[in-house]
Amino acid sequence: MTLDHIEQWFKDNPPPKKIKVSRFEMITDTDKFIKNHIRTLRANPGNRTFIPYYERLIQLKKVCE
């Protein structure tokens, strides 16, 4: 899934402000989380160091579905 698709999905399906993504992880400001992760990934295209940012966006998407 491309970053553009993920970004569009979150625009079409806004998550709640606060969400528990796993037993030990809670996102308290999902808007900020999404914008920050997308901005970081766009600033570092192809840099494998930033794969966890992509994976966390996918994890949030799965929880929201």
Image (tube, helix red, strand yellow):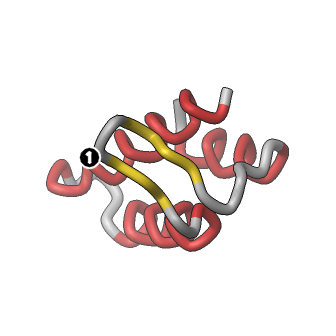
**Would you identify the image quadrant in which residue 55 lies?**
top left
Q: Is residue 11 above or below residue 31?
A: above
Mark 1 Cα shell of 10 Å, populated few (<14), some (14-19), many (≥20)? few
Q: Nearer the viewer, residue 21 or 5?
A: 21
Q: Is residue 36 above or below residue 48?
A: below
Dot 1: element:
helix
Instruction: Please state which amino acid type lies under the numbered disc 1.
Output: Ile
Percent across and percent down for residue 10 are 71, 48
Residue 14 left/right relative to 6: right
Percent across and percent down for residue 20 are 49, 45
Q: Which residue appears at 47% of the width and 58% of the height?
A: 27
Q: Is residue 58 above or below residue 3?
A: above
- Residue identifier under label 1: 51
Q: Residue furthest right?
A: 12
**Would you identify the image quadrant in which residue 34 lies?**
bottom right
Residue 6 left/right relative to 28: right
Screen quadrant of the C terminus: top right
